[in-house]
Image (tube, rainbow, N blue to C red):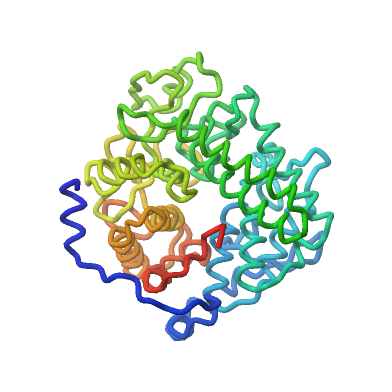
Amino acid sequence: MNKYIATLALAGMAALPNVSAQKIADNESLKALRTELSDVNELMKNGIMTEEVSGLDYFTGYSYRTLYDWDQYFESIIQLYMGWPATYMKNGVQIFLDNQREDGFIVRSVPGNEFHDNEHVKPFLAQIALLVYDEYGDKELILKPENMRRLKKYLDYWLVDMDSNGNGLSEWMSAPHTGMDNQLERAGLWLERVSEGVDLNSYLVRECRAFARLAELSGDKELAAEYRKKADELAERIRTMMWDDEDGFFYDLKVDPEGPMDHYNKIARVNMYKQKGNMIPVRSISSFTPLFAEVATPQQADRMIKEYLFNPNEFWTPAPMAALAKSEPWYSTILLPNDVGCSWRANVWIPTNYMVYHGLRNYGKDQLASIVAHYTQKIVKEAGNREYYNSETGEGCGLDPFWGWSLLGHFMEWEDSIPQDVTKIDK
């Protein structure tokens, strides 16, 4: 065991208790926690908005009203844990589906804007719909044939239209498209479409599996089998094509294998790349998504965890975990020249910590997962409800107050006390 992990594991985190199966929302300890978080519940009410065209109410963490794609997934879990009805979750999915073009494309934010209008919604819609069914028993979304047709078309747009080189891996349009706005070195600027993302393709594995379950629930076993096969084939491509055995790390790939790296250097002069064939050798927290999607082999997961995750020279920063490895030359807690959007060059973002936490649980690393849950909740408790956090000091950054996905931090130690896993696709 890596010495950094060995030191942390001495914290002696308890094993998960044997709790009988029940709906997560009905858990008595969760109900008690909600009472303690009554002020957070009140804060969240600021996020209830009404979409002008449809008249549907939805939830967003942003005071400027924008409904974002992957935010909706994490915010749905928060609403579930807070005891809210499924209404805003369902409406969020419905609003995206109602904004679909005939070819399957859906803009990644509602309302759209000049920057988002050419970027397809991130693949989380089927996962949200499945969460609504699993935790609320509500099949309304998937019993509408039109919605299943739309979900299939949006997923196919990712799998076919967003695979321009035909190698079976889908592509981001830009770093902002990834949601990690200024990780420009691995995904480029607006519309440059230079990166096949490890994170994107891992999300797609989960989304195909979620859609397969929805298809089964809607009575279409043949469609379910088709998308399970797509998920399995994509998972194998990630394991074999995106894994660098020399470094022991998953890397994004260049869309054009022969493409130069000069493009990236123009964005960040601090970047000094070593060439690794068609790989983009940037160590981002996004590369742990194969653990969240249960794509990595046990051996691959072990190397990622032992050599990088809990290493203070990589991702285990004073306030863990950084969005970029500390060993990267552009690791910075502040925006660099030519950066866009929010800062993912260092800094702690609760949803990525959350995915890492569940990735560790997926691979039986329960003690290490408990450590992640503890430190993530500690950051939120001490710095408050903020958009993100300084990875060196733990100081809150960005929107203040923030009632979006960061609120997951309040629930992580509780979540660590139960055997159920709300993020599991196949239950």
Q: From the viewer's perspective, tell me whether residue 276 is left or right of residue 152.
A: left
Pick the front one: 377 or 244: 244
Percent from the top left, x then y, of residue 93? 70, 58
Residue 283, how many percent across, how many down?
A: 36, 36
Residue 60 position, x and y percent, is 61, 63
From the viewer's side, name the closer residue of 420 and 56. Answer: 420
Q: Residue at x 69, y 61 (%)?
A: 92
Tell me: residue 194, above or below residue 176: above
Q: Give the residue at x 17% y 53%.
A: 6
For residue 176, say whether it is visible: no
The answer to whether residue 352 is left or right of residue 128 is left
Residue at 52 percent of width and 32 percent of height: 237
Tell me: residue 154, above or below residue 360.
above
In percent of width and height, residue 183 lies at 45, 37
Q: Quadrant of the C terminus?
A: bottom right
Work out whether 3 lies above or below 383: above
Left or right relative to 177: residue 18: left
Q: What is the tally of numbered marks visible in this picture?
A: 0
The answer to whether residue 28 is visible is yes
The vertical placement of 295 against 40, above or below, is above
Closer to the camera in the image, 60 or 156: 156
Image-based side of 306 in relation to 388, left or right: left
Q: Quadrant of residue 248?
A: top left
